[in-house]
Amino acid sequence: QVHLVESGGGLVQAGGSLRLSCAASGHTFSYYQVGWFRQAPGKEREFVAAITWSGANTDYADSVKGRFTISRDNAKNTVYLQMNSLKPEDTANYYCAAGRVATMTRWDEYNYWGQGTQVTVSS
């Protein structure tokens, strides 16, 4: 069993930065892939970024490449999402998810989810 808690969301102006954190409980977290997903009102859940258990491989949505960076610190049971050059289009509730998945970009393959943290980017 893994329990995830996101933090770091907030209100920021366009061009600003935020760092989201996903803190996990459970000794098996280090061996799980972790993904970030987001969902805006009236929109479908969207893949943002993902990272393998070792941190050797990462994946990003085209819309955030070059602006967002995912990383993890297994010793702290935490995964981070550094978000730079934020745009109003990034406004959404952001969720982290963990699991031993075959395809990191598919939300329905993850077993564990946090409650989300709101990111709002103003013009």
Image (cartoon, rainbow, N blue to C red):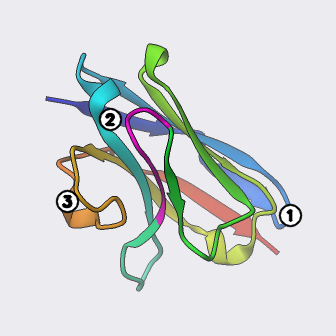
Residue located at (50% from left, 39% from top): 56
Which image quadrant is residue 42 in? bottom left
Q: Nearer the viewer, residue 81 or 56?
A: 56
Element class at badge 2 = strand
Segment tinted magenta in the rendering: 48-55
Q: Which residue is mark 2?
A: 4
Percent position of residue 37, x then y: 42, 61
Disc 3 residue type (three-letter):
Glu
Badge 2 density bin: few <14, some 14–19, many ≥20, Cα 10 Å: many
Residue located at (37% from left, 35% from top): 53
Disc 1 residue type (three-letter):
Gly
Look at the image and say whether residue 36 sits in the magenta stretch: no
Measure the alpha-carbon separation of dots 1 and 2. Answer: 28 Å
Q: Which residue is mark 3?
A: 109
Percent position of residue 88, x then y: 71, 75
Element class at badge 1 = loop
User: Of tags 2 and 3, which is closer to the observer?
Assistant: 3
Measure the alpha-carbon separation of dots 1 and 3. Answer: 33 Å
Pick whichever of labels 1 and 2 is earlier in the sequence: 2
Percent position of residue 67, x then y: 74, 61
Disc 2 residue type (three-letter):
Leu
Residue located at (41% from left, 22% from top): 77
Q: Which residue is mark 1?
A: 15
